[in-house]
Amino acid sequence: MSDPTAASSIATQLDDLRVEIDRIDAGMHALLIERSGIIDQLISIKARQGGGSAFRPGREAEMMRRLAERHTGRLPLDTVESIWRVIISTFTFLQNPYAVHADMAGGDAAMRDSARFHFGFTVPLHSHFGTDGVIRAVAAAAGDLGLLRAENAKSAWWRDLMPPEAPKIIARLPFVERPDHPAGIPVFVIARPVTAAAARDVVFHAVTLDRWREGLAEALATLGGAIVGHAAESDGAALLLSTPGTLPEGRLSATLAEFAGTTAVTAVGSHAARFELA
Ligand SMILES: O=C(O)C(=O)C[C@]1(C(=O)O)C=C[C@@H](O)C=C1
């Protein structure tokens, strides 16, 4: 630029914008510090609820839904979502440290992206090759979370969630589903049973039939349910079924009875309603 006056005016405008950015950054930082001031109160209130994991999946799903709904402006939703995932996961960690165990058998990159996007880098991430190691690790450590692929099951891993004290499904990632999500592989989060804090919009059931039955998917659809996983096991067709949390007790068993006679149905977890953005 040859005109020194114009150059100095541009420099001044840039300086002014940087003053504005510094003011906004300091405000955001102060708000984060203020947010962290609530952690001790959260710890003592949750201790009165019995302690344990600070993770409240239903609350987090609702927060992520509201964030996506109110977001406007130039900043991509991916950016805002990932920032809040790191904030919330780190706040959970500060209340009660935990680790994330992920099954990398279906490919390391996509699972690692999901883990880091949703839980950040402060929360330790442990890789496992296969679902067994993840489920065992979560069963052994109160508060730890496991990540298992929600689609294309290679084995009926959900049968390991059947004992009452075994880990259960507590969330599905991503919280905000949309095409081209940067960490969008469908993932179930498992944890030791969470009782009071569980979100129950979608409920999961482990069922084994002596053999596969045509028409079951359609019959489940009339209940608002679905076959989420199926695997051929030595004792028959092992199924992971979902139903709405509002389905009256006994309706699933009655529907299954029409297909396969009396069938044992075992609850293996639940999560908040899925939220899809076009
Ligand atoms: O609402 C709570 O129970 C919190 O602990 C706060 C918070 C958050 O940082 O917003 C953190 C962990 C929970 O999973 C949900 C939300």
Image (spheres, rainbow, N blue to C red):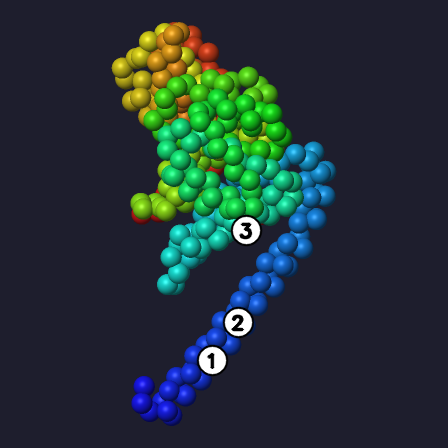
Q: Measure the C-alpha gap from mark 3 to mark 1.
A: 30 Å
- How far across and how far down the image is residue 234, in percent? 38, 7
Residue plotted at (35% across, 46% down): 181
> Label 3: how many residues lie within 10 Å, few (<14), some (14-19) or many (20+)?
some
Q: Nearer the viewer, residue 197 or 32?
A: 32
Q: Which mark is residue 22?
A: 2
Seen in the image, is 262 located left or right of residue 35? left
Q: Amino acid at mark 3?
A: Ile
Q: Amino acid at mark 2?
A: Asp
Tell me how far mark 2 sits from mark 1, CA to CA: 10 Å
Determine if the C-beta at disc 3 is less than 8 A from ligand 1.
yes
Q: Secondary structure at mark 1?
A: helix
Q: Secondary structure at mark 3?
A: helix
Mark 2 or 3 closer to N-term? 2
Mark sitting earlier along the chain (3/1): 1
Residue 152, above or below 32 = above
Q: Is residue 205 visible?
A: no
Asked which secondary structure carries label 2, the reply is: helix
Q: Is residue 86 visible?
A: yes
Residue 9 relative to residue 142: left or right: left
Report which residue position mark 3 lands on. 87
Q: Which residue is mark 1?
A: 15
- Residue 194 locus on image (x, y percent): 59, 31
Q: Amino acid at mark 1?
A: Asp
Which residue is drawn at the image coordinates 45% and 45% (left, top)? 117
The mark closer to the camera, 3 or 1, is: 1
55 is higher (above) or lower (below) than 194: below
